[in-house]
Image (cartoon, rainbow, N blue to C red):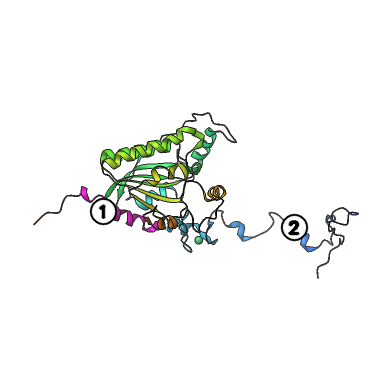
Amino acid sequence: MMTTTFTKKTLGLETVEPAVTPPPTTAAEPSFVKKPKLGGGKSKKRDIPEGLWVKCKKCGNLVYDKELDETLKVCPRCQYHFQIGPRDRVLSLVEPGSFEEMDANLVSVDILGFAGMASYVSKLADNQKKTGEKDAVLTGVGMIGEHKVALGIMDFSFIGGSMGSVVGEKITRLIERGTAEELPVIVISTSGGARMYEGMFSLMQMAKTCGALAYLAEARLPYISVLTHNTYAGVMASFASVGDLILAEPGAEIGFAGARVIKDTTQAELPPGFQTAEFLLDHGLIDAVIHRKDLKKQLIEYLDFLTARFRPAPPTT
Ligand SMILES: [Zn+2]
């Protein structure tokens, strides 16, 4: 049996003695007070490098990092779709060696001289260092199957995938190139919304990108929008929601304002699954929910259909 050498414990009412503090260490110290020696242990756990295991946000299981690389960052147990970087996405969709990046060196300017908890300039520098990217979208042209496409992929890890002037400009130039070269345009979105560090200039990107899409539509060229976890606010309220086809990944959360804000504002109970891809598919906003491993195959199928008029007519006999 475990015994202690100090018996007085306060229950909050016995004010004569101060709150119990364990006495200085003695040989008779109870075992539960002993602390393990730091650095002296030979635990094998310490030999495992950090970052090899990732905890799944949905099922809570630990997933081996390498396994996630093989599954395109989808949990093998519950199929939760982790966010995936834009360059990994290119590898998963575009034919090897065919991707030609556009506007790689476009960088944002701190036009407002924004200074809050951190200045916008330092925020940009930190995110550029962290991600190795200049801003929150990667754009270029490449081959998906036999289709040459203009492809834009947003990056949530760069200031929450927010859309400032660089994101808006790169997406606009991508759409304009698609229009000029008669290419289908595909944008894979993930974003927290407009980048408020750029104030009004970030909001202007909503109109600018949609203006470019109007010219693409006038040229009768297809635009496919792919929504991934999560796509919100200014991006969802502009180019992400106006695709000829709107696809989404399973479980992706999509909307204008977040569920908590809507709940607080309306004081109403929200239906189950509110703002998920599956809910929006049921309610007609999204055309298909597609597992990441099937996205390339499905895109090729849709592109075959949408670009049929560009193919030469079969010879008549
Ligand atoms: Zn899982």
- Expressed as whole percent of the image width and height from the top left, the position of residue 67 reads 46, 59
Asked whether 169 or 132 is in front, the reply is: 169
Q: Do the residues labelled 2 and 1 touch (CB within 8 Å)?
A: no
- Expressed as whole percent of the image width and height from the top left, the position of residue 316 reads 10, 55
Q: Can residue 59 be seen in this view?
A: yes
Q: In which quarter of the image is residue 104?
A: top left
Q: Relative to 44, is 276 on the left or the right?
A: left
Please determine whether, in this image, residue 4 is positioned above or below residue 16: below
- Badge 1 amino acid: Phe
User: Marks 2 and 1, how far apart in space?
Assistant: 68 Å
Range shown magenta: 290-314
Was residue 301 drawn as part of the magenta stretch in this picture? yes
Asked whether 86 or 78 is in front, the reply is: 78
- Badge 2 amino acid: Lys
Q: How crowded is mark 2: few (under 14 residues within 10 Å), some or many (20 or more)?
A: few
Q: Residue 305 carries which label?
A: 1
Q: Residue 35 carries which label?
A: 2
Select label 2 or label 1 by which is in front: 1
Sequence-earlier tag: 2 or 1: 2
Dominant secondary structure (helix, strand or loop) of the stretch shown in magenta:
helix
The residue tagged with tag 2: helix, strand or loop? loop
